Amino acid sequence: MANLTIRDIARLSGLSKSTVSLVLNNSPKVDPKTRRRVLAVMREHNYVPSFAATALAKGNTGLIGMIVPGLTWRFMANINYGVAKVIEDTKYEIVLFTSTNERDYSGAIDRVISSGVCAGLIVVAHDQQVLDRLVELNRGGMPTVLVDTLGAISDLPAVGADNYTGGLLVGRHLLGLGHRRIASILGPTDHPYVQERRRGLRDAMHEAGLEPGPGLEAETDFEEALIRSRTRELMRLSPDRRPTALFAYHDSAAFTVLNELAEAGVRVPEDVSVVGFNDIDAAAHVRPALTTVQQPFADMGRRAADILLTALDSTESDEISQRIVLPTKLIVRDSTGPATADR
Amino acid sequence: MANLTIRDIARLSGLSKSTVSLVLNNSPKVDPKTRRRVLAVMREHNYVPSFAATALAKGNTGLIGMIVPGLTWRFMANINYGVAKVIEDTKYEIVLFTSTNERDYSGAIDRVISSGVCAGLIVVAHDQQVLDRLVELNRGGMPTVLVDTLGAISDLPAVGADNYTGGLLVGRHLLGLGHRRIASILGPTDHPYVQERRRGLRDAMHEAGLEPGPGLEAETDFEEALIRSRTRELMRLSPDRRPTALFAYHDSAAFTVLNELAEAGVRVPEDVSVVGFNDIDAAAHVRPALTTVQQPFADMGRRAADILLTALDSTESDEISQRIVLPTKLIVRDSTGPATADR
DNA sequence: CTGTTAGCGCATTCAG
DNA sequence: CTGAATGCGCTAACAG
């Protein structure tokens, strides 16, 4: 069944193409009766206007691309939700591009940009390398806004959360509980968000007149095995150097830490306190429930969408290069408690 | 900066439009030197061919739409991974459409289909209502394949997993451990996959000459509170009626059950065994590690993509309406053990 | 309110 | 190997 064109349905309803076009675009300049008739004919013949032709004629695909590293990170769903909530009330449609490679998705970026499908882009990127590629490819000038990429070097508008204060709050909370040796299970230290959280924790310790103990910062990546072995190493330190609290760079890492500790017979929070970051759904449901830092992911998505929409609707090159920092919040649950060991 | 057209770069490189078009389409009929020169000019001026124009001229957007209920279900990422793995080696691009409403995303389907953006569709739908809407809208004839929707009523090609055998295996495993009173924490019973799993469990019990005990099938939805209260009710039954094993309809529900039991001081698997379904990543990491049924989600995605691609590349209306059932597998971990109570 | 006339940017004949 | 001509399906002035 060959697809019908606007011409067919014009003929079918005894009108001209342009009248049909007008009803397609909800023009008020068309007689309601005529409109209804045309609509009926379209439905009857199952007519769908060609997306490509419309886009070409209008000079706008009406598609907003969202580029994310992968779907396995829980909070992607939350960011996406925020974006979708804003976009679904507009004439735009959001399409999500992912990669099968979480580390390097420049390939996806390549394809999305060079296909030119999208009118604008919302991208979640933590890696400077990916970002560089994005900026390079995007010199053409497709409106783009970054999410969760604060601190990275680029002139693109960005919205993120206050990772520094998150780290600071964790530090103060732990210090307030009497902890003095606080270890960090860090993510990749070249990621800005990791650096920010670390800086926050350090500043909190400085406030208390403390220096981060030597060997208490363990760098890891996203491999569970590595996180486990780093945790083991930390707990094997002599009692006077062993940390009484562990700050994991994100909740999933914290879960792994929790599992490792449980298997080693270490009690949480009696023997050691554990803190995560992000407050993903599961954080409230593991046992013990995880103390963590909440990031307003849905809000981040919403704000990013807002920025992109205004950029899209304004006369181009308005040079809106804003940077929005949303607050983070400490959520205290059961995985942290007073330091009992030799204080 | 106005976007350049093929005409501009033709002029810029002193050639005709068609020659440029040929290099765009990798035609071998163009002098390599000329090709390189043209490519250089394109790069220099940051030229990107218009997606809409290309799609219109070729009569194909080269976009495959994937419609999913939401991103919060862990296994969506796995299905998507499988699809992406297949599609990324083709000329097609995959775009993911989600809804902010997991229950009813017919709106998303409406928009995707009536926009006509996609050349083909891969849709994950568990709800017959959503499916009906899909079929109705899709009478136009956009190639579509269903994922994880086996058992639903439609003529569309579909790939899913063997939920019946999954239920059967769970039943036999539990029966083999001596359990006689096996309760089910069911999902929405109008969902085919729920029905299949239940049928499997029932058949296993029939094999052992048993009937599902009265009141041992608790229907729930996706609300945590409901799952918790159903679990409580089951455990409050008198000792001679209380189940010694709980079969949750998916892993997340099983986690909730586990939490509820832990809070009530019920030991797993000593006091009661718990089984999930899906084998999402976390299943291996909760404590106790969850016995569950593995579904080959990535494979499901792969197969669906394969089917769609052949449908897309074949001369239309080949009426490929296949139905692929992939095997499920029981993964025994620590949450199930021998029945000890009054046997 | 409706019909006419041009393009939108590219692919694809068909001659040279 | 290259250039000129034509059309993909729709929108957008402009006339009537």
Image (cartoon, coloured by chain):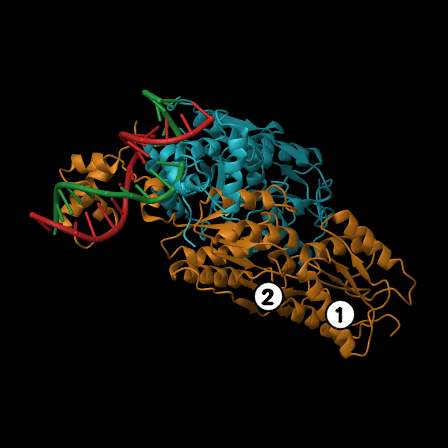
Chain colours: A orange, B cyan, C green, D red
Kindly identify the residue that appears in the image at 66 percent across and 34 percent down.
B330
Q: Is residue A269 visible?
A: yes
State whether residue B84 is above or below residue B46.
above
**Where is residue A110 shown, x and y percent of the image?**
55, 44
Q: Is residue B68 visible?
A: no
Parent chain of label 1: A
Parent chain of label 2: A
- Specify the quadrant that holds the N terminus of chain A: top left
Kindly identify the residue that appears in the image at 91 percent across and 65 percent down.
A239
State whether residue A118 is above or below residue A44.
below
Circle number at residue A337: 1
Kindly identify the residue that appears in the image at 37 percent across and 56 percent down.
A90
Secondary structure at numbered mark 2: strand
Q: Quadrant location of residue B248?
A: top right
Q: Quadrant location of residue B315?
A: top left
Q: Which amino acid type is shown beneath numbered disc 1?
A: Gly
Secondary structure at numbered mark 1: loop
Q: CA distance from mark 2 to mark 1?
A: 26 Å
Q: Which residue in the structure is indicated by mark 2?
A: A161
**Where is residue A81 shown, x and y percent of the image?**
49, 55
- Choose between B41 and A341: the one closer to the eye: B41
On the rendered structure, is A239 left or right of B12?
right
